Amino acid sequence: MPAVRVEGLRKRYGDTLTVDHVSLEVRKGEIFGILGPNGAGKTTVVECIAGLRKQDAGHIRVGDFDPQSQRSKVREILGVQLQDCKLPEKLRVEEAIRIFSSFYRDPADREKLLADVGLTDKRQTYFENLSGGQKQRLSIALALVGQPHIVIFDELTTGLDPEARRLVWELVESVRSSGVTVLLVTHSMEEADQLCDRLALIDSGRTVVCDTPANLRAMAVQALGRDDATLEDAYLRLTGKNFEVAG
Ligand SMILES: Nc1ncnc2c1ncn2[C@@H]1O[C@H](COP(=O)(O)OP(=O)(O)OP(=O)(O)O)[C@@H](O)[C@H]1O
């Protein structure tokens, strides 16, 4: 059984069809990327997967469960870090982890979690005084506090400097090594190429292709006759659009 299965997902906001027939399958134990430009509909897809939005059409399964009708079951196996995690400014790191732990029957060990995300020495620090990278590492800890089997990370590294981004990438790798399936939303080609085992390329609310970064690059190499073809070239080839302006 796949970790997550999405078939023919559609979601409309008013008159706009934001997600139009997105289908994808996330295998257990992989880092699966949803890659697309800003506004492509990536967040809407993962919000439907998490049961935070109701789709207009299509089927979603998280493990064996339907996020709409079995939301509490899905909450037991799915951890979510959504874009722009904002906590009260005067909340300390360890208070945030304690509060989130209280939502779960069998929460993770709080000391281990702090150590795993490299925030043990920041436990007494207010949220407002954390750096961007530390805030993102805290948001990863909060997504993992319920010991999920699958975790969604949405735009984890946007705005981080290269060093902070590298630390977050290492953390994502170690989350996967611990046996958790990762569904990663990103608009960074580099991040997708670096971290993901497989990707769904999303363009204007549609899945263009699902494949490994290496296969997508190989496709672009063959199509363009250039050995240095990149994921970006593959995107351009598949959509006819430049990634930066496609959303
Ligand atoms: N609640 C809403 N009501 C109306 N329109 C919305 C709503 N949420 C998102 N949209 C619109 O749907 C489109 C897709 O948004 P979404 O956040 O899913 O895209 P995204 O690919 O995650 O983009 P980004 O990378 O910028 O976060 C955008 O045009 C956005 O403005």
Image: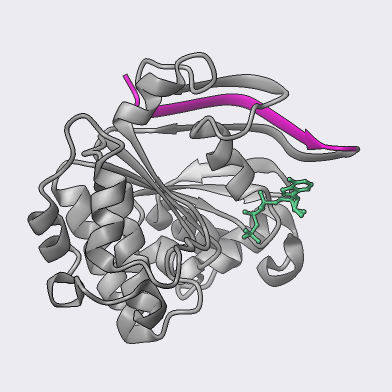
Please state which of residues 92 and 30 is positioned toward the viewer in this rendering.
Answer: 92
Left or right of 25? Residue 15 is right
Quadrant of the rendered image containing residue 141: bottom left
Please state which of residues 76 and 39 is positioned toward the viewer in this rendering.
Answer: 76
Please state which of residues 245 and 233 is positioned toward the viewer in this rendering.
Answer: 245
Q: Does the stretch in magenta take in 4? A: yes
Left or right of 118? Residue 87 is right
**Is residue 110 positioned above or below 190 on the image?**
above
Residue at image location 20% in from the left, 76% down from the top: 122
Residue at image location 87% in from the left, 37% down from the top: 14
**Is residue 123 positioned above or below 151 on the image?**
below
| Number of numbered labels in the structure image | 0
Stretch in magenta: 1-14
Please say which color scheme the image uses.
Answer: one colour
Left or right of 158? Residue 172 is left
**Mainly helix, strand or loop, the magenta region?**
strand
Q: Does the stretch in magenta take in 62? A: no
- Rendering coords of residue 51 (x, y %): 53, 30
Left or right of 104? Residue 202 is right
Residue at image location 59% in from the left, 67% down from the top: 233
**Is residue 63 positioned above or below 107 on the image?**
above
**Position of the N terminus by quadrant:** top left
**Is residue 183 positioned above or below 51 on the image?**
below
Extreme residue in the right direction: 15
> Is residue 143 visible in this depiction of the protein?
yes
Quadrant of the rendered image containing residue 172: bottom left
> Is residue 3 visible in this depiction of the protein?
no
- Rendering coords of residue 215 (x, y %): 42, 52
- Rendering coords of residue 83 (x, y %): 52, 58
- Rendering coords of residue 214 (x, y %): 38, 57
